[in-house]
Amino acid sequence: MDNLMEKLRILTDAAKYDVACTSSGTSRNGNGKTMGNAVSCGICHTFSADGRCVSLLKILLTNYCIYDCKYCQNRKSNDIERAAFSPEEICRLTMEFYRRNYIEGLFLSSGIIKNPDYTMELIYETIRLLRYKYGFNGYVHVKGIPGASKELISRTGYIVDRMSVNLELPTSEGLKKLAPNKTRENILTPMRMIQGKINESKNEVAIYKNAPEFVPAGQSTQMIVGATAENDFQLVSVAQALYRNFQLKRVFYSAYVPVNEDSNLPAVDTKPPKLREHRLYQADFMLRFYGFDATEILSETQPNFNVFLDPKCDWAVRHLDRFPVEINRADYYALLRVPGIGPTSAERICKARKHSALGFDDIRKMGVVLKRALYFITCSGKMLYSTRMEENYITRQLVGEDRDKTRFIEENDVKYHQLSLFDDEVFKRENVG
């Protein structure tokens, strides 16, 4: 028992820099025969689609690794504590934590041991046992191992909910520099294969309702931000290409946390670029939900974000010729481009104005953030306040409104806190298994 708990301590900590785990996008109910379901789960210390704060057991199968990626804490040349679970041990931990209501699912990644196929085989065997021997019907997200055979990835994809293959770095040059054992092609090949199998599975399910689903919650990936010199425009453009060409559910961004001394990396006392990561996530929402193109958000002449202003506000103040828009007449897509108006509030506006003209109090109740939107909208031809439609003036007002939020992001390191099962005093008094 002590040995198992020591492994758990090492391998949950080793997983903390991997942010590409999420569980939205699947809705498998309990079946009355097995344990658990996959309805609206979420990632460690985050919120699900229905607003619940939920968690996954997020661990590595092992932190032994044959690769020597310069940015990675678990690279083979690092002198760190090493451990490896057996498939049975992971199954026991998952089931015991689920019974104690600590978790709602499993996120499993791994270092590369022996070779990619050997590692992928262990991951597959772990999930096979969890599903068929232990009867776990809950959410499972695993990492697809670049270089593993198509057969192994295919077998695994039919028994998990989500699979992710980490791009790691946005350019081939970055990979060559920091991850010499990886290539862009051996990362994109399994992504392309997973995409093809997902589409094939959807077609089969449409014809045969009982056909098995392949990765029903889709695939995701992660890019490290700040380990190499790519600008924000390159990162956003790569993310857009991944969404369009591989139909990814999510691209995750991970601010580089310096853990290794290396001449090719930022100094170990460099602060993680958390605010930059935050801006990338905001831009990512613009791509996925607001109808923006990467070339509208940034460009070759303006390749990096204004860190003092969120990207949607920055776009708006650079395009004042398109504003103000009239709340009672603008179409849904024009409303989406207004800072302070999101998809839900835009939809509410479009429905409500069919019955009567809307005023500022009405749209505030619908969720519009007026302290941002007021510079860009009119209601029945009138602005909320008399406002100078000048870029510098509006920018100053919005920067002031956003200052406290950006200061909190820069000064607090909450993003890098790995959920620890050892924080629970009850758990400390219990035995597992």
Image (tube, rainbow, N blue to C red):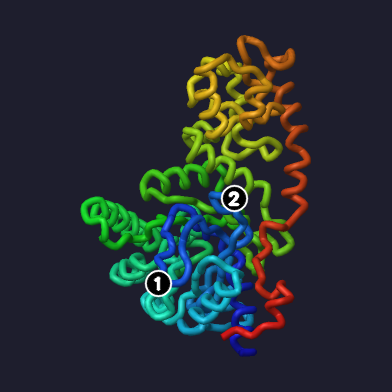
Residue furthest left in the image: 207
Q: Quadrant of residue 395?
A: top right
Q: Where residue 225 sits: x, y (%)?
A: 59, 53
Alpha-carbon neighbours of circle 2 within 10 Å: few (<14), some, or many (≥20)?
Answer: few
Residue type indicated by callout 2: Gly
Q: Determine whether 70 is above or below 232 in the image.
A: below
In the rendered view of the protein, which quadrant contains the C terminus?
bottom right
Instruction: Give the number of the disc on residue 33.
Output: 1
Q: Quadrant of residue 74?
A: bottom right
Residue furthest top in the image: 381
Tell how many labels: 2
Q: Where residue 289 sits: x, y (%)?
A: 49, 38
**Picture residue at 53% right of the left edge, 64% below the top:** 178
Looking at marks 2 and 1 on the same chain, the residue that comes earlier in the sequence is marked by: 1
Asked if one can make out residue 314 in the rendered structure from this viewpoint, the answer is no
**Picture residue at 65% right of the left edge, 29% below the top:** 365
Numbered disc 1: secondary structure: loop
In the rendered view of the protein, which quadrant contains the N terminus?
bottom right
Horizontal arrangement in the rendering, residue 91 relative to residue 102 (left or right): left
Instruction: Say which residue label 2 marks.
Output: 51
Q: Determine whether 134 is above or below 249 in the image.
A: below
Asked if one can make out residue 395 in the rendered structure from this viewpoint, the answer is yes
